[in-house]
Image (cartoon, helix red, strand yellow):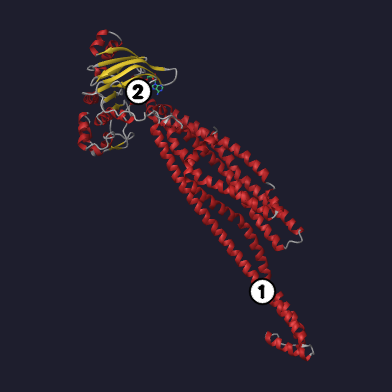
Amino acid sequence: MSDTTRAIRFFYLYLKKYKLQFVVIMIFIILATWLQVIAPSLLGDAITNLGTYVKDYFTHQGAAGMKKMLDGFQPLIQQANLPGTTKMSEVFQMAHQTAASMHISADKFNQASAMTINQATAIAHSHAASTTTFMKGMWQLLLVYLATGVSMLIYTLLFSRIVAHSTNRMRKGLFGKLERLTISYFDRHQDGDILARFTSDLDNIQNTLNQALVSVVSNAAIFVGVLIQIFDKNITFALLTVAASPVAIIAAIVIIRQSKKATDKQQEEVSQLNAYMDEKISGQKEIIVEGLQEDSINGFLKHNAKVKKRTFAAQAWSGMIFPLMNGFQLLTIAIVIFGGTAYVLNDKSMSIATGLGLLVAFVQYVQTYYNPIMQISSNFGQLQLAITGATRLNVMFDEPEEVRPENGAKLEHINEGVQIENLDFEYLPGKPILKNVNINVKKGQMVALVGPTGSGKTTVMNLMNRFYDVNSGSIKFDGKDIREFDLDSLRSNVGIVLQESTLFDGTIADNIKFGKPNATQEEIETVAKTTHIHEFIESLPEKYETHVSDDESVFSVGQKQQISIARTILTNPELLILDEATSNVDTVTEQQIQWAMEAAIAGRTSFVIAHRLKTILNADKIIVLKDGEVIEEGNHHELVAQGGFYAELYRNQFVFE
Ligand SMILES: Nc1ncnc2c1ncn2[C@@H]1O[C@H](COP(=O)(O)OP(=O)(O)OP(=O)(O)O)[C@@H](O)[C@H]1O
């Protein structure tokens, strides 16, 4: 499936809910388009009406009208030799008398005067009619502009609402998905990359839906509407209007293609720069320790220079489209004026006012015709970003989720113990990590896992609460495969203290009661006392209400682990897995961690991944792992007596410490 098809499928899934709103939006887009299309025509008509109105106005008001009227009376007035100030009724009266004295029959006189009066009345009527037509045209135009604005406002508001709702649903869906993903997804993806899906990818989709999509749909409608309208109005003028567009469209396609290539390269460079910065920010302490700041800056400058180069290229290509289309628009206006004037002058049957109206209307049409082409081409880059965004979100949505057994049994207690049987596991196909591991632990026993780095100790822990599932063999609680338990109940009964503890944004109290939000202050303080961190917390000005986060912590690494142990004890898990902190901690903290661990382990079935062997001297069982295999098993004295790998390890560490 192509990226565009996947993106369309993605948008369909999220937008199909708003079918009715889309129908209303389409109605208003079509209405606004139709109004915009007829506006130039109405403007042309108004110009024609204005011409007639002005002509009639002068005919009626000006010299020509007066002359025409007076022409009829001229011979009579001259013959009567009257002063210029005489009123028309007096003139008429006198003219009548004079005509009688000149032996002009009353009939003839009446005929002549009636002709004059009719002429004046016709002019007055024509003037009144053209005034009404002109005013009506102006009102129509005003209403059309007003209705266009209102229609655009309605569909834009409706669209904004849909966009806000749908992107909100996308964000929620994405976060929900994130929570359901397997741990291996997080192993394979950098934090920055995951975060980018929530920020830049969603932003691109939101901006495109908000601006570009409405614009593309309405502009495509306007384009079709203008085409129909111009060919309906006048074929010669319409042909003149579209004459240059094939060349314009070919030029636009070429530029858009180049622009897309340049934008892709720009984004590649931007993501490389981001990855570089991500790496340097998280490793800043090491950079300072090693005095590598200058190298770090030089590396940054190299990436930044590449981004600058690619950004310029992308901007140059995408910036070209607008002036180019503007040029085609101006060229077409010139074609319409020259070609149109020649056509109007050649067509004897067309009045000057009609010709002028057509010219004005088509100069307007050229703009309405090119505007959509310009808008669609300039929105293409934004559309491309949204397609990329939707594709990236789709990829995340398609990731496999944790397998949750339907109607899985609720785990409440572990009454007999934990059995790991013939367990094989590999993270990556063809690279076995654990090989035929067998461990049997009775309820309440403490088992220690020891072995060199990379021997698979943490991996055993990862399998115990189903971060990963075994490839073959099984892990059983009281003889029941852990894959048959409801995942939430399994995890809430398996407490894990990780080597590197995390603090969440909130107070110290919030952090301790993380796994049991309704814990009382008394319960919180009890576990803090058990893990020997209470006194330190009490020494802080705001005590348990001190604000902490993973970045701004008041705790040392060892103290963080004490908090983490307190947090785990509070949830009172049936099985405890403890990965001892390897980081250098001072002897006082080490002793406090040791006490905290002992308090956590007491009476509980537990696995301890030990790095300092003195932590596990009292373990009921010590499992020695090497290259993913159990090579020795027994308690401390038995293993020392065996004189094998463990005895060697113990001797080395003892000498070292
Ligand atoms: N997510 C992963 N994807 C692929 N390989 C992994 C992953 N996690 C660990 N490994 C590999 O599995 C092997 C066992 O790792 P594991 O973390 O279980 O060792 P460990 O005994 O706990 O080491 P350490 O004492 O250093 O914590 C190592 O070779 C490691 O590189």
Residue 474 located left or right of residue 296: left
Looking at the rendered image, the quarter that the N terminus falls into is: top right
Residue 229 in view in this figure: yes
Residue 61 in view in this figure: no
Above or below, 110 relative to 182: below
Residue 505 located left or right of residue 389: left
Q: Are marks 1 and 2 in contact (CB under 8 Å)?
A: no
Q: Residues within 10 Å of mark 1 (few under 14, many from 20)?
A: some
Q: Where, by quadrant of the figure, is residue 83 drawn?
A: bottom right
Nearer-N-terminus badge (1/2): 1
Residue type at tag 1: His
Residue picked out by circle 1: 125
Q: Position of residue 440 (x, y in %)?
A: 28, 17
Above or below, 439 relative to 392: above
Q: Where, by quadrant of the figure, is residue 553 drawn?
A: top left
Report the Cα–Cα distance between label 1 and label 2. 98 Å
Q: Position of residue 353 (x, y in %)?
A: 70, 63
Above or below, 100 relative to 282: below
| Secondary element at image label 2 | helix
Q: Residues within 10 Å of mark 2 (few under 14, many from 20)?
A: some
Residue picked out by circle 2: 463
Q: Position of residue 544 (x, y in %)?
A: 24, 37
Give 456 or 554, whichever is nearer the viewer.
456
Give 331 or 128, whichever is nearer the viewer.
128
Q: Residue at x 58, y 47 (%)?
A: 375
Q: Residue at x 33, y 24 (%)?
A: 482
Q: Position of residue 443 (x, y in %)?
A: 24, 21
Please tell me how many numbered marks the rendered image carries: 2
| Secondary element at image label 1 | helix
- Quadrant assignment for ligand 1: top left
Looking at the rendered image, the quarter that the C terminus falls into is: top left
Residue type at tag 2: Leu
